[in-house]
Amino acid sequence: MAQNGLLLSRLYRFGRRSDRRPGGQVVRPSRPYSLAMICSLLLPLDILVLTASASLAYALWLVGDPYSLWTEYGLITAFGTLLAVNLFYLTGLYQPDILKQPGVAIRRVAACWMAVAATLVAVGFLTKTSEDYSRLWALSWFTLSLATLIGLRWLFFVQTARWTAQGKLQRTVAIVGSGPLAIRLADHFSANPADGIRVAGIFSDENRPASSSSRVPARRGGSLVDLLARVRRGTIDTVVIALPKFSERRLQRILVQLAEMPVDIRLCPGPAALRLMQGGISHYANIPMFNVTDRPFSDWRYAAKEIEDRLLASLILLMIAPLLLLIASLIRLDSPGPVLFRQKRYGYNNQLIEVFKFRTMYHERQDLHGDQLTQRNDPRITPIGRLLRRWSLDELPQFLNVLRGEMSIVGPRPHAVSAKAAGLLYQDAVSQYRARHRVKPGITGWAQINGWRGPTDTVRQIQKRVEHDLYYIENWSLWLDFKIILLTPIKGLIGRNAY
């Protein structure tokens, strides 16, 4: 481990020095433009779009109005523009990878611009200055800006996709290595043409063929000497070193030969890199490390999720308070016992929490640990309880769990400690079951709106539920939460499996 750490440190220092020749001459890349350069144009263009839209709206509605001074409108335009570009930056809209995800980028642009509009309205209300500005101007500015921002990015997506297909943004990669790792890496690059990577070949650093595999001859680039010659001709942009097993001496020998070459040099450290390639790299005390996994909610993501939960839970509880009182009264009239049913369930970080529900079973026949799953025409369920379960109204008290910080509105559903699928405890039936507890459990979730709710008579049912829960965790966004909340009354509340 100590040798590996020393090796990574030397590689990092090598990377920091490799952009200059010994004489101090800067090494120029073989291609003068890239996705990063194109993406960097978005910031000034966004500023231009927002200020031009505000100016056009002013020219359309307010020119000649003695009570509407451009200086006042210019101030709010500058504030809104500054806020917008900062939000765009924080949400990754100026990162090169976003040019490959048009749907994600457009949703983020719309969400950020709506957040700016809401912020400006809130500031105007709190400072009592909203009456000083034309609502027609504000509406025109917001609409024109949103349409133009989306149109601008769509043009960028279309043009970059065209340039990539034409090879103008394509990067030529040479792989130094031998064996299955080099072949798998070449296959991966070839299978993802949208990434704009062309494999020049697999080059061996030894005096023998790169591999005896039948797939290699078509990609065989020759020896390291051949690679150096191609680099000098300016036909290689990046060299990836992909050695399944290497010593520090062998790696240093390769790096010394490549050190003077004006190319990017990257290291693919063994087969693990192919499994961890989506995580990226972090630096701790200047040492590069693979990102194996991240906390689902941290920093601003955590703050956004908490604000969403507390704010929506408070508003919903205020709106449904009469319904809660009505249901409580019906339960008391239907059968003796408490109105609320409290059950221990697994929550965040696999800790037990007490989940609130309206009581739907006869008090003396309640199942505190969930040992027995409910069935159709279950005799333990009261007449009112059957109706509540059918419409998922028994879950409404869980908004109190949200206010207490134990649950979220959207997330994996909490399960009873003894819940089983086909006679197996959930954690025994699905190996990744506990991974769903990396976030707070929710009142509704991605699995529920996709039909995976109700009893789990088979292992497949709990497997599909966990699969959807993990998808939600890995792909969380505020937009996904709002989508689930909007679809829950349509797809999540009523179902044939709800009993």
Image: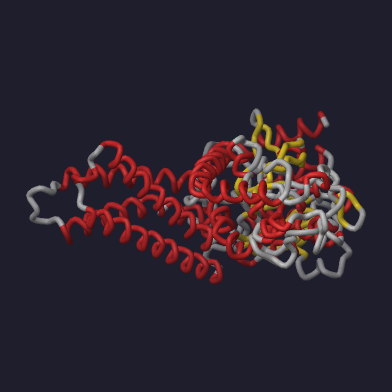
Camera-side residue of 307 and 241: 307
Q: Nearer the viewer, residue 12 or 323?
A: 323
Q: How was this image coloured?
A: secondary structure
Q: Position of residue 83 (x, y in %)?
A: 37, 43
Q: Which residue ends up furthest to the right in the rendered image?
A: 423
Image point 27% across, 47% down: which residue? 77
Split into 4 quadrants, where in the image is the C terminus? bottom right
Q: Is residue 21 visible?
A: no
Q: Quadrant of residue 185?
A: bottom right
Between residue 12 and residue 102, name the one nearer to us.
102
Which quadrant of the figure has residue 296?
A: top right
Tell me where residue 281 sits by quadrant.
Answer: top right
Determine whether, in the image, residue 483 is placed left or right of residue 1.
left
Residue 192 in the image, given as x and y percentages of width and height: 67, 65
Identify which residue is drawn at 41% across, 54% down.
42
Count numbered badges in the picture.
0
Q: Is residue 112 visible?
A: yes
Q: Is residue 320 above or below residue 126?
A: below
Q: Nearer the viewer, residue 6 or 96?
A: 96
Quarter of the rendering occupied by the N terminus: top right
Residue 186 in picture, x, y percent from top left? 74, 61
Residue drawn at the location 56% of the way across and 39% of the way down: 306
User: Residue 35: x, y in percent?
Assistant: 51, 56
- Residue displayed at 82% across by 44% down: 364
